[in-house]
Image (cartoon, grey):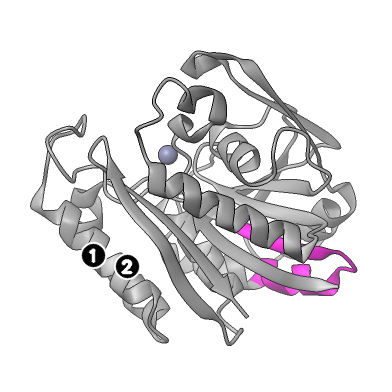
């Protein structure tokens, strides 16, 4: 059918329900925001969700696609021995995507049944532990944010050519230097970066402003997976959409943003 859904969500492991029991006071607003995004996904009856992740196998210059018929996931590395995920892949769309993009951008395909934790947090918070909706994890690369934006435009063309109902979730954390509880300490760039991102995201010409953000500001703010946002922005660049930030919340000195892009 085509490309019908886009959202930006965080991937902090404390958002995993089993880990939330330990740390339930953390990120309460983000949890509600994620249930709202999950409801949107369910209402769209998506067949396949592209997840743009900063925590999968990553190459300096090439974008990556983890191609697998079935994925599993867990959070053992964070002390959760109970949660186990099972989610199908979409081999057809993954092959088509590879075929379409590999002649246009540096692109590499790998196969890893165990999901990276970024994708796994997105799956458990938005799709649940045993999803019928397929996922295709896409890794960001070390290329420029402009390259990520153009890659997103290609991904969208491919998503539009399929008979599936396709959505995208990019997973990014904003600054890791918002206050003293951050492992890297506070930096003035942190809150400036976070407020600019929020301000630009909801504007019509926001993508251009985000592409033009001062590189030093970005580097000093230390976001995680900032390029993932640009894949999403490239995908929706030709769509007359309405962006809304559902929530922004700080914990551990890190900015957590949840946003929906409606059309
Ligand atoms: Zn991260």
Above or below — where is 217 with respect to 65? below
Q: List the residue tagged with mark 2.
A: 198
Numbered tag placed on residue 195 in the rendering: 1
> In which quadrant of this rendering is ligand 1 seen?
top left
Q: Residues within 10 Å of mark 1 (few under 14, many from 20)?
A: some
Q: Quadrant of residue 56?
A: top right
Q: Is residue 128 magenta?
A: no
- Residue 102 visible within the image: no
CB under 8 Å between discs 1 and 2: yes
Residue 251 in percent (x, y) is at 28, 39
- In the image, taking residue 68 as reference, residue 262 lies left or right, namely left
* Residue 45 picture location, percent across and down: 80, 61
Q: Is residue 56 left or right of residue 134?
A: left
- The question of residue 160 being in magenta is answered with yes
The residue at the point 22 percent across, 40 percent down is 253
Q: Which residue is painted at 81% across and 65% down in the image?
A: 165
User: Which span is picked out in magenta?
Assistant: 154-169
Q: CA distance from mark 1 to mark 2?
A: 5 Å
> Where's the C terminus, which quadrant?
bottom right
* Rendered view: 229 above or below 32: below
Circle on res. 169: none
């Amino acid at each position: 059918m085509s490309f019908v859904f886009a959202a930006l969500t965080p991937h902090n492991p404390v958002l995993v329900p089993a880990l939330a029991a330990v740390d339930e006071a953390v990120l309460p607003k983000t949890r509600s925001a994620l249930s709202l995004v999950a409801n949107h996904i369910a209402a769209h009856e998506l067949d396949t969700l592209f997840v743009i992740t900063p925590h999968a196998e990553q190459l300096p210059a090439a974008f990556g696609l983890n191609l697998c018929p079935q994925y599993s996931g867990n959070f053992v590395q964070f002390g959760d021995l109970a949660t186990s995920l099972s989610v199908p892949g979409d081999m057809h769309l993954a092959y088509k995507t590879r075929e379409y993009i590999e002649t246009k951008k540096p692109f590499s395909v790998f196969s890893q049944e165990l999901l990276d934790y970024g994708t796994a947090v997105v799956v458990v918070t938005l799709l649940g532990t045993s999803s019928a909706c397929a996922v295709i994890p896409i890794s960001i690369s070390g290329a420029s944010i402009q390259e990520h934006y153009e890659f997103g435009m290609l991904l969208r063309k491919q998503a539009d050519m399929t008979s599936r109902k396709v959505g995208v979730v990019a997973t990014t954390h904003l600054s890791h230097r918002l206050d003293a509880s951050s492992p890297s300490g506070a930096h003035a760039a942190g809150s400036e970066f976070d407020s600019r991102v929020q301000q630009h995201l909801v504007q019509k010409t926001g993508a251009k402003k985000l592409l033009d953000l001062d590189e030093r500001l970005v580097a000093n703010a230390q976001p995680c997976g900032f390029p993932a946002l640009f894949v999403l922005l490239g995908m929706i660049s030709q769509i007359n959409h309405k962006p809304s930030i559902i929530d922004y919340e700080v914990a551990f000195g890190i900015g957590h943003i949840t946003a929906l892009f409606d059309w």
